Amino acid sequence: MAIVARSIMDTHRDPSVAASLERAATGPITVDITTTGRRSGMPQRIEIWIVEVGGRLVICGTPGPRGWLANLRADSAMTVHLKDELVVDVDFDAQEVTDPALRREIWTHAGTEWYRNQSGLDDLIADGPVVQLVPREERRLGAVR
């Protein structure tokens, strides 16, 4: 998480933003995300969990169609709205995680236990939606972790 927190602090110059996101290292944090509707072109805001796995911020879901994922496949730009201890918006790009080894690492992490209780591990690895959040400034520089 230190890598992610450092890049967010470099981009936003606000250590409290990085500290709030670092809480994801100990388990999921509840946030809102705004994506652009793939058909409507309008902002779509939902509540979702973010978890940190191996220095990456990720959003996961149980297998099945997900509007947020379809929107991010069409336009990877998104805003994460922190809303608990700190209320702030942070811009990210989403990258869908397709590498089987990384998917296994994410789905076996303690922070994704809730999902494993909903679906079997093999189903999650094969079909559970997973995106990695890359801070917008970092994405512009071409550095993806």
Image (cartoon, grey):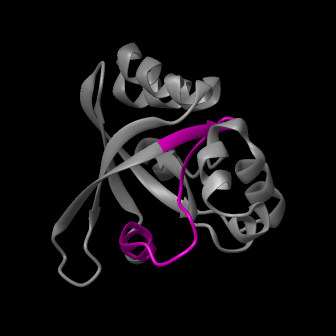
Q: Residue at x 46, y 28 (%)?
A: 21
Which residue is depicted at the point 73% across and 41% down?
109
Relative height, residue 66 to residue 17 (above, below): below
Image quarter of the C terminus = top right
Q: Residue at x 77, y 48 (%)?
A: 108
Asked if one can make out residue 5 in the rendered structure from this viewpoint, the answer is yes
Is residue 54 visible from the viewing direction of this image?
no
- Residue 6: give x, y in percent of width and height: 54, 24
Magenta stretch containing residue 137, yes or no? Answer: no
Q: Is 61 on the left or on the right of 46, as rendered?
A: right
Provide residue 118's location: percent of width, then percent of height. Answer: 60, 58
Q: Which residues are magenta?
A: 50-73
- Left or right, 35 with reference to 24: left
Asked whether 10 or 57 is in front, the reply is: 57
Q: Nearer the viewer, residue 42 or 137?
A: 42
Q: Quadrant of residue 68?
A: bottom left
Relative to 110, residue 132 above or below: below
- Across and down, in percent, residue 81 comes to 28, 40
> Which residue: 41% across, 76% down?
70
